[in-house]
């Protein structure tokens, strides 16, 4: 039995909505057996699916196709998660790699700093 790719990804809970799965397929973020796939691609048991979500590339092997979305505990009966641990570790990367932190007081002045600066300018101008 064959199933649409976008529906299958939604059924195994790779995406929260079927629309998200379809958009990922249209955005070339999903590959089946090494080739970019459209949402209507028919998948069958044994196919390898790669999904690029954020910094991580998830890998799934289709064990069995299904018609309806299943509970999280039943997903293992329909898809085998082959995602390597090195990819999953990207989810827990330190915040410094994604966000630039700045020291307090550097950069633009706060409202309080701005009022202080304006008061100093007013004092200098009135002299």
Image (tube, rainbow, N blue to C red):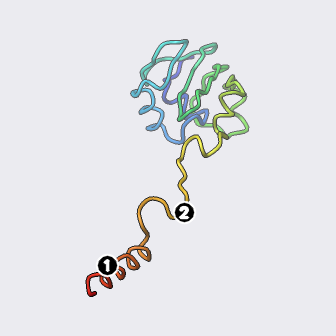
Q: Which residue is mark 2?
A: 104
Q: Secondary structure at mark 2?
A: loop
Mark 2 crowdedness (10 Å alpha carbons): few <14, some 14-19, many ≥20: few
What's the CA distance linking mark 2 and mark 1?
23 Å
Q: Residue at x 59, y 31 (%)?
A: 56
Residue 81 as seen in the image, left or right of residue 15: right
Residue 65 lies, in percent from the top left, at 60, 23
Residue 119 lies, in percent from the top left, at 35, 82
Residue 78 lies, in percent from the top left, at 67, 26
Q: Secondary structure at mark 1?
A: helix
As drawn, the residue found furthest toward the bottom would be: 126
For marks 2 and 1, the one nearer the N-term is 2
Q: Nearer the viewer, mark 2 or mark 1?
A: 1
Q: Residue at x 58, y 27 (%)?
A: 57
Residue 58 as seen in the image, left or right of residue 108: right
Front-most of residues 80 and 42: 80
Q: Quadrant of the N terminus?
A: top right
In the displayed structure, 29 sits above or below 69; it is above
Residue 88 as seen in the image, left or right of residue 36: right
- Choose top left, top right, bottom left or bottom right for residue 58: top right
Q: Which residue is mark 1?
A: 121
In the displayed structure, 59 sits above or below 119; it is above
Front-most of residues 77 and 89: 89
In the displayed structure, 112 sits above or below 27; it is below
Residue 55 lies, in percent from the top left, at 56, 33
Mark 1 crowdedness (10 Å alpha carbons): few <14, some 14-19, many ≥20: few
Front-most of residues 41 and 30: 30
């Amino acid at each position: 039995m064959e199933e649409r790719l976008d529906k299958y990804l939604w059924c195994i809970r790779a995406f929260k909505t079927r629309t998200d799965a379809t958009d990922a397929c249209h955005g070339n973020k999903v590959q089946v057996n090494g080739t970019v796939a459209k949402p209507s691609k028919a998948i069958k048991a044994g196919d390898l699916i790669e999904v690029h979500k954020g910094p991580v590339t998830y890998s799934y092997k289709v064990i069995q196709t299904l018609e309806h979305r299943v509970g999280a505990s039943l997903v293992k009966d329909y898809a085998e998660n082959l995602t390597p641990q090195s990819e999953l570790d990207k989810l827990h990367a330190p915040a410094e790699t994604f966000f630039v932190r700045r020291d307090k007081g550097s950069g633009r002045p706060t409202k309080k700093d701005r009022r202080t600066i304006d008061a100093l300018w007013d004092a200098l101008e009135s002299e």
